[in-house]
Amino acid sequence: MSPTRRLIGAVFALSALAFLQFFFPSVRVVVWTGAGLLLLFSLVDLWKLRSSPSLNVDRQVQGVWPVDVWNKVSLSLHNCSDATIKLEVIDDYPSHWELQGLLHRCQVAPQAHTRITYQLRPSRRGDAVFGTCFVKVYGYFGCWERCFRLGESQAVKVFPDFSKLLGNTINATDKRAPSVGAIRKRRRGEGTDFRQLRDYRQGDSQRSIDWKATARYQKPISREYQEERDQQVVFLLDTGRRMLAQDGVTSHFDHALNAILTLSFIAQKQGDAIGLLSFGGESRWLAPHKGRVGLDRMLAGVYDLQAGEVAPDYTLAASTLLTKLRKRAFVVLITNLRDEDDSAMKSACELLSTKHLVMCASLREKSLDAALNAPVEQFNDALRYSATTHYLQLRDRAIKNLGIRSTQLIDITPERLSMSLVNRYLEVKESGAL
């Protein structure tokens, strides 16, 4: 309970009049009359604010939010009493979210409803909680105000913005349009899984003709093949300290998650099972599953996954994955390599390659490319350029020491990771290497 500005202003005004009564005795009547009325009004307000108001607060908020996207939240206020309630409402939203359209002052008529709408934008993935609303109720005469906590708490989940990260990739994969970003190369061979028989078309290879069906139908019949299905794509994701690197507003780890979800969508459309093992910081295992179930499990399993200040152990991660995977899989290892990683990373890749097809994706800081392309005009610029060149040379040497073929290793900036993984996956599918 606290006095309002109106009450404080009235007290100061009466104090000024009380001072003037020493010079103008006739003012004394006005002072005492005003003081009596002010005391009466303030006591009435105190009495009316003695208990919680008959006000129901109901929040309408979606249970799942996409990160970095503005969405609306509605508060419904229902006055169950027979008196008008003057109030201010502040919702207890997650503190790290961006806000528009709140603090709201209004009055609710007796037995009436009113609705308040404002907007929020979550800044990071994970779980978040809306607390009970802060409601400041004013007395009938506006002398006193009192704060109450009304409504209920609600838990929500913040997922990556799946619609945004899949936008161009879905179009590129479905339409096979190189201009959009994903390059669909010419098939080598004709696939390995039989799909159907169909009429012979001009340009079909003679090896695709089914001679028994041709003799039976008395016309040329070709076999049609499709890319292999029912395979496994498993991500080995580094959650160590290097993935905390940030170019702009998005960390390398979030770029990696976006790329994983993008390729997961493509893989489940191709009929493959998708899974994930995180290592370094938090260890989390998602067994491979096919179809929409697999994609939903992937989304639910990584939306709150975060990188931590821990050094990754590549050999331990490879050993753990080998014990969990029985069937041959396309393993995509996503990390940020350094020159000191050559021996550990090489051992991990050799261990995994005994049973699986491995591809390593190393995220390179965008600032390195910017340092190389920056003009060299002063001595400090020359030092920066030479240090960056030396670091990249050590990095290239470490990558070469891994002994992985160039088709199974990419060193790329985070923004280009999604499209590179999609293109490599399609190449693997078309070549039948898995």
Image (spheres, rainbow, N blue to C red):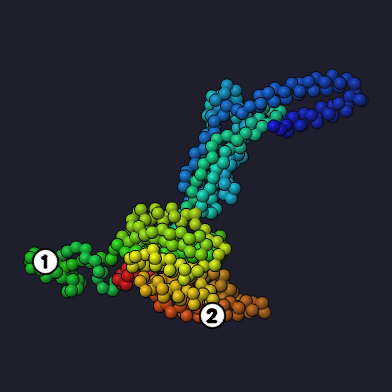
Count up the numbered dots.
2
Q: Position of residue 418 (x, y in %)?
A: 43, 64
- Image quadrant occupied by the N terminus: top right
Tell me: residue 85, above or below residue 102.
above
Q: Position of residue 263 (x, y in %)?
A: 39, 62
Residue at coordinates 42% horizontally, 77% vertically from top-left? Answer: 404
- Circle 2 packing at 10 Å, graded few (<14), some (14-19), many (20+), is few
Disc with the residue nearer the chain's start (1 vs 2): 1
Residue at coordinates 54% horizontally, 40% vertically from top-left? Answer: 153
Residue placed furthest toward the front: 323
Residue at coordinates 14% horizontally, 69% vertically from top-left? Answer: 210
Amino acid type of the residue that numbered disc 1 sits on in the rendered structure: Ala
- Mark 1 → mark 2, Cα distance in angstroms: 59 Å
Asked if the residues shown at circle 1 and circle 2 are in contact, with their CB atoms under 8 angstroms apart, the answer is: no
Tell me: residue 157, above or below residue 389.
above
* Number of the label disc, if any, that sits on residue 393: 2
Amino acid type of the residue that numbered disc 2 sits on in the rendered structure: Gln
Q: Which residue is mark 1?
A: 213
The answer to which of 54 and 418 lies nearer the viewer is 54
- Circle 1 packing at 10 Å, graded few (<14), some (14-19), many (20+), is some
Q: Secondary structure at mark 2?
A: helix
Tell me: residue 412, above or below residue 65.
below
- Image quadrant occupied by the C terminus: bottom left
Would residue 417 be visible to someone looking at this image?
A: no
Q: Secondary structure at mark 1?
A: helix
Would residue 317 be visible to someone looking at this image?
A: yes
